[in-house]
Amino acid sequence: MFDDENEPRKKAPAVKNLEPMSIDELQAYIGEMKDEIIRTEQEITRKRAHMDAASSIFK
């Protein structure tokens, strides 16, 4: 097979430097990350439902 099949699709994003950020900026950043987690979890749920529906056709 191909060696690149086992490599990650994307490299991890660079770690953000938190040092220069104020407390308010850090709290806003946490809020943004939490929103992104929720969005990602919703996409996982949507894809699982799609996969389950497809699986049920082939049973």
Image (spheres, rainbow, N blue to C red):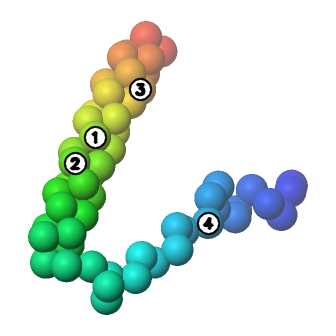
Residue 11 got which mark? Answer: 4
Left or right side of 52 for 24: left
Q: Nearer the viewer, mark 4 or mark 3?
A: 4
- What secondary structure is found at the residue carrying circle 4? loop
Distance CA(mark 2)–CA(mark 4) = 21 Å
Distance CA(mark 2)–CA(mark 1) = 6 Å
Q: Residue 38's image quarter?
A: top left
Residue 51 in sight here? yes
Distance CA(mark 4)–CA(mark 1) = 20 Å
Q: Nearer the viewer, mark 3 or mark 2?
A: 2
Which comes sooner in the sequence, label 3 or label 1?
Answer: 1
**Is the C-beta separation of discs 2 and 1 under 8 Å?**
yes
Distance CA(mark 4)–CA(mark 3) = 26 Å
**Is the C-beta separation of discs 2 and 4 under 8 Å?**
no
Q: Quadrant of the C terminus?
A: top left
- What secondary structure is found at the residue carrying circle 1? helix
Q: Nearer the viewer, residue 1 or 15?
A: 15
Q: Quadrant of the N terminus?
A: bottom right
Q: Which residue in the structure is indicated by mark 1?
A: 39
User: Residue 3 location, x and y as percent?
Assistant: 83, 63
Which comes sooner in the sequence, label 3 or label 2?
Answer: 2
Distance CA(mark 3)–CA(mark 2) = 24 Å
**Is the C-beta separation of discs 4 and 1 under 8 Å?**
no
- What secondary structure is found at the residue carrying circle 3? helix
